[in-house]
Image (cartoon, rainbow, N blue to C red):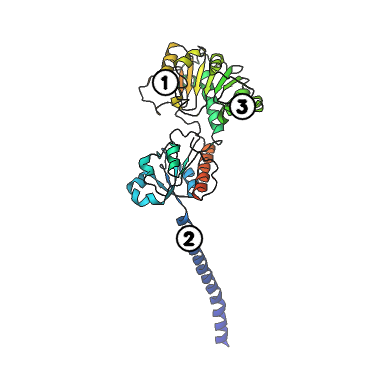
Amino acid sequence: MQSISYVRCVRRLWGPAQASQLLKVTNLHRSVRQLQHKKVMEDNKPWALISEVGEQGYLEEFVDIIKQRFQIICLKDFLQNPQLHGPKIQAMLVWVACPAAEPSLLSLLPSLKVVANGGVGIDHLDVPYISSLGVKVTNTPGVVSDATADMAMGLLLASARKIVEGHQIAVNPNSTHMSLDLMGDEVTGSTMGIIGMGDIGCKIAKRGKGFDMKILYHNRNRRSIEDEQAVGASYCENMDELLKESDFVVLAVNLTPETTGLISHRELALMKPTATLVNISRGLVVDQDALVKALQSGTIHAAALDVTYPEPLPRDHPLLGLPNVVITPHYGTNTYTTTRKMVQRMVENAVAAVNGQSVPNEVKPK
């Protein structure tokens, strides 16, 4: 009887142990299968070529968005062995014009299906040539508009109210009192002329309306009456009229052959001597030599620029030494929210192109 009791006791103790061990083995097998499945899924993702990860490219959190749909390789690593990597690359994600979609690089990518650009401007892309290779080109309109319009208004305010100069006085260790002779220009009730009334231009007008500004605009095509009324804008068929009447001239055009050098000596001379030029479009829209002369001579009052040519300017460029100029390093879209939206849109466009689906933001050659 004692031996039978002993056996029963061992069974009671050993049974749960076996069950626990079996459960551990089962969980281990499940984890292995999940890892194998994940690896298969990763291996099945298409490959994308990007610029780099870090301050000169994508921040890590934005790279994670790309990795959800693509395997990635940075340009530097790709160029170490283009023969190995080239045939598997199906998408090129262009960020701040890098990687440069030049023939020398494109010739190394026989399987490429799409060049997905981050941002609206595509002046750095030869769309007809890329399209002739059977490769689609995409951009990210709409998602950049709010941040860029915010930047335009921020530059306008910084210049008009001398915010940068005020900051320098406030933090200067030699400042013993707050100067009362630093006088700015009134923004409320002034006239803002917007050249280029696309989505960004309309967003800028909306912000200007919030400051009770009179809004003038010039565009290739007049907006609808409803659009004009929504932001309180009046159309100037002749750009000269806008230049003559505006206290603040804001450039929001795409860079094209027609808009290159749009603002030069003649146009600056038409502006009020009290006027400020704000540029958030592209540096080449403005003749910078003409702008320097206009600022030095008092032809116009000031300039506020988020874009120049080149970027950055040479450290001895005269624009950098003028007291009536505010310059920021082309970061009109640099907010976490907007950048995240841009990368997500790039990925959506690229995935659609790779899968042969309709591409939401395809840019077709003209």
- In which quadrant is the N terminus drawn? bottom right
Instruction: Report if residue 322 is visible in the image.
Output: no
Q: Callout 2: 10 Å neighbours few (<14), some, many (20+)?
A: few
Q: Which mark is residue 35?
A: 2
Q: Measured from the top left, where is residue 132 in percent x and y?
A: 43, 42
Of callouts 2 and 1, which one flags the residue occurring earlier in the amino acid sequence?
Answer: 2
Mark 3, Cα crowd under 10 Å, few <14 / some 14-19 / many 20+, is some
The x and y percentages for residue 360 are 55, 42
Q: Nearer the viewer, mark 2 or mark 1?
A: 1
Q: Which numbered dot is residue 223?
A: 3
Marks 1 and 3: CB-CB under 8 Å? no
Separation of residues labelled 3 and 2 (CA atoms): 55 Å
Look at discs 1 and 3 and give the one toward the viewer: 3
Instruction: Work out whether 248 lies above or below 135.
Output: above
- Nearest to the eye among marks 3 and 2: give it: 3
86 lies left or right of 335: left
Q: Which mark is residue 288?
A: 1
**Amino acid tagged 3:** Arg
Most foreground residue, 363 or 271 = 363
Disc 2 residue type (three-letter): Leu
Q: Amino acid at mark 1?
A: Gln
Secondary structure at badge 3 equals loop
Q: Quadrant of residue 307?
A: top left
Using the numbered discs, state the Cα–Cα distance from disc 2 to disc 1 in whole angstroms: 57 Å
